[in-house]
Image (cartoon, rainbow, N blue to C red):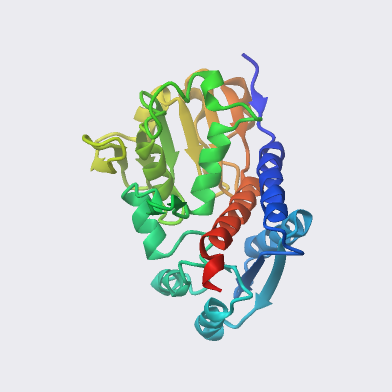
Amino acid sequence: MPCEIVDVGEIADSFREEIVAAIKKEDLNFGPKLVGFLSNSDPTAKTYSALTAQSCLAVGIHYELRHVDKEDLEEKIVEANEDNSVHGIIVYYPVFNSRQDQYLQNVLSAKKDVEGLCHKYIYNMYHNVRFLDEGKEIKSIIPCTPLAIVKASFFLKNKILEHIAAYNRLLPYGNRLHGRVITVINRSEVVGRPLAALLANDGAKVFSVDINDVQEFHRGTGLQFSTHEAKNTSYKMTDVLPFSDVVISGVPSANFKVPTELLKDGVIAINFSGSNNFGDDVKHRASFYAPAIGKITIAMLQRNLIRLYQNYRDDE
């Protein structure tokens, strides 16, 4: 089976159409308004902010980038929290590259946290709480990059994963990855660990690979939306790759490569690192390969912004 290189631009475009339609439905002249705070000199953050600005302009979202000294950032976030003309906030990390960054994530109001990194949304995600208000069916916000990877997995070139026998819509909602094995190489608190939890909450057996060990994430027993469980294993990465249906890697190093010879034929390979973690020969082993997911991440950011606007517009 020839490998299909996933055009993430096509996937992102499908979500952008939804975003444009939602803005028209709200009958907004131009908006909602997203404010980005840049307090570092990281080239990746600068590139991401520029792409966000370009993408927001294309769909009719007002985007404003604010360059702020990191010593003043907390105060400026609080000001934006209290500004009714601002509907969403994104902070380009790292700022302090320490636990202070985690503190800043929780300074953001949950009403404006488009990245879904504050405690309320992270708690909901890990505990598989899908709604902020069950009665009104107000959905919780999911962190952008993990959500983008899930959408890339479920929407490969406009094909739901069921077409390649990895996503089974015949199973109940919340259990449609049952029987699938997924390896996630990276266990950061921003992407890798939340991603493993999201996939496990949809029924997959997930092997979470870190520099020191491999953990297994899987759905707990009980109710349909029971939360995931994680346990330590004695496995190494090389043990779990050969029987993984999907391999997702985000190691921030140009020197790291997933060993292609250990991948099963027909594997789905997804890279979310700034460096490519897969060699060119992955195309001879994989059925689908996504070398980057940045455009989908921005689309999820915008999608979260629309959701926040719709959830809280009556509070203005």
Which residue is more in the foreground, 222 or 248?
222
Quarter of the image for residue 217 reads top left
Q: Residue at image x 71%, y 37%?
A: 10
Asked if residue 131 lies left or right of residue 6, the reply is: left
If the image is split into quadrants, where does the C terminus sit? bottom right
Q: Position of residue 107 (x, y in %)?
A: 44, 75
Q: Position of residue 32 (x, y in %)?
A: 66, 64
Quarter of the image for residue 195 reads top left
Q: Position of residue 227 (x, y in %)?
A: 29, 43
Asked if residue 34 lies left or right of residue 307, the reply is: right
Vertical placement of residue 115 versus 238, above or below: below
Vertical placement of residue 298 versus 288, above or below: below
Q: Residue at image x 38%, y 47%?
A: 211
Answer yes or no: is residue 92 visible.
Answer: no
Which residue is more in the foreground, 182 or 308?
308
Q: Residue at image x 61%, y 13%?
A: 1
Vertical placement of residue 128 versus 268, above or below: below
Q: Position of residue 306 (x, y in %)?
A: 60, 57
Which residue is more in the foreground, 103 or 135?
135
